[in-house]
Image (cartoon, rainbow, N blue to C red):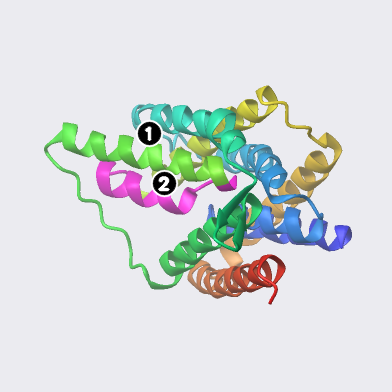
């Protein structure tokens, strides 16, 4: 199963290298179902893997100057604050089990449930969203307030599930900041890098035990996949791969929901 996890890590990197976003959402199920890591701990591992993956993916955008530092700052600051608070204080304080009458809902079940629902949202955006159209407003205060709110929400959800959140960040940057898609993706990747590193730092401060060998191995596999994806991206239809990956996310999310219900609610 561990070998299969490494193989899927490479495939995840290929998706990231081809589409520029989306693949990192697979990190959590890879860690939980192939590497047999507890979901709460897996979110911490996911953060550091996503951070380095996003950094590798952002290099070409940085060299091409496809990054807006002003927008990055407006989005990143609330996102960083929210993810740090979530990882450092909220998640550790959350009870391991909630009792609703005779029903026991575990912390791990809630993490995987929230993750699968966000995965369904990502698949919907990949399958059914049309080309994002910029709607820059003359009211900069209104636009910036939307960016700040979105940054805070993305930081919160990233803190819970450990995913990058690029599928939420890119549309916000395009719609509210008027960035073109390539600049939005480049800015998004670096935002993901910053907030994921801060979130992981919160875990370290909270005393989470980290298997750095496993993290390094998965990061290497993912980076190899990214290089493959970037090299062959011109020969692959981005729209076709996007739709295929969208349907794949639906299957994975439904699998997670069914599996977690069977594990946690045996009749």
Q: Secondary structure at mark 1?
A: helix
The residue at which mark 2 appears reads as 169
Question: Residue 137, percent across and down?
Answer: 15, 42
The residue segment tinted magenta is: 161-179
Q: In the rendering, which numbered label is found on residue 8?
A: none
Question: Residue 203, percent across and down?
Answer: 65, 30
Front-most of residues 249 and 53: 249
Front-most of residues 230 and 81: 81
* Label 2 or label 1, whichever comes before in sequence order: 1
Q: Secondary structure at mark 2?
A: helix
Q: Main secondary structure of the magenta part?
A: helix
Q: Is residue 166 magenta?
A: yes
Disc 1 crowd rating (10 Å Cα; few below 14, some 14-19, many 20+) is: many
Q: Quadrant of residue 52?
A: top right
Q: In the rendering, which numbered label is found on residue 75?
A: 1
Who's the residue at 40% across and 42% down the image? 153
Who's the residue at 39% across and 27% down the image? 73
- 75, above or below 118, in the image: above
Question: Residue 111, percent across and down?
Answer: 59, 52
Q: Is residue 35 magenta?
A: no
**Horizontal placement of 148 versus 267: left or right?**
left
- 242, above or below 42, in the image: below
Disc 2 crowd rating (10 Å Cα; few below 14, some 14-19, many 20+) is: many
**Horizontal placement of 52 versus 117: left or right?**
right
**Contact (CB < 8 A) between labels 2 and 1?**
yes
């Amino acid at each position: 199963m561990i070998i299969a996890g490494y193989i899927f890590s490479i495939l995840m990197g290929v998706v990231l290298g081809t589409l520029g976003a989306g693949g990192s959402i697979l990190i959590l199920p890879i860690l939980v179902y192939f590497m047999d890591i507890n979901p709460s701990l897996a979110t911490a591992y996911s953060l550091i893997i996503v951070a380095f993956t996003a950094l590798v993916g952002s290099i070409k955008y940085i060299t091409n100057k496809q990054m807006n530092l002003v927008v990055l700052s407006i989005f990143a600051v609330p996102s960083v604050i929210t993810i740090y608070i979530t990882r450092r204080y909220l998640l550790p304080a959350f009870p391991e089990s909630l009792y609703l009458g005779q029903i026991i809902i575990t912390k791990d079940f809630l993490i995987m449930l929230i993750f699968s629902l966000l995965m369904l949202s990502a698949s919907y955006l990949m399958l059914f969203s049309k080309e994002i159209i910029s709607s820059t407003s003359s009211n900069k205060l209104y636009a910036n307030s939307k960016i700040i709110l979105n940054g805070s929400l993305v930081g919160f959800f990233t803190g819970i599930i450990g995913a990058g959140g690029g599928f939420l960040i890119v549309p916000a940057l395009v719609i509210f900041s008027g960035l073109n898609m390539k600049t939005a993706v480049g800015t998004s990747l670096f935002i993901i890098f910053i907030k994921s590193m801060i979130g992981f730092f919160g875990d370290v401060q909270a005393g989470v035990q980290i298997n750095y060998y496993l993290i390094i191995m998965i990061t290497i596999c993912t980076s190899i996949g990214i290089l493959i994806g970037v090299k062959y991206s011109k020969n692959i239809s981005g729209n076709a791969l996007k739709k295929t990956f969208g349907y794949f996310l639906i299957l994975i999310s439904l699998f997670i929901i069914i599996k977690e219900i069977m594990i946690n609610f045996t009749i």
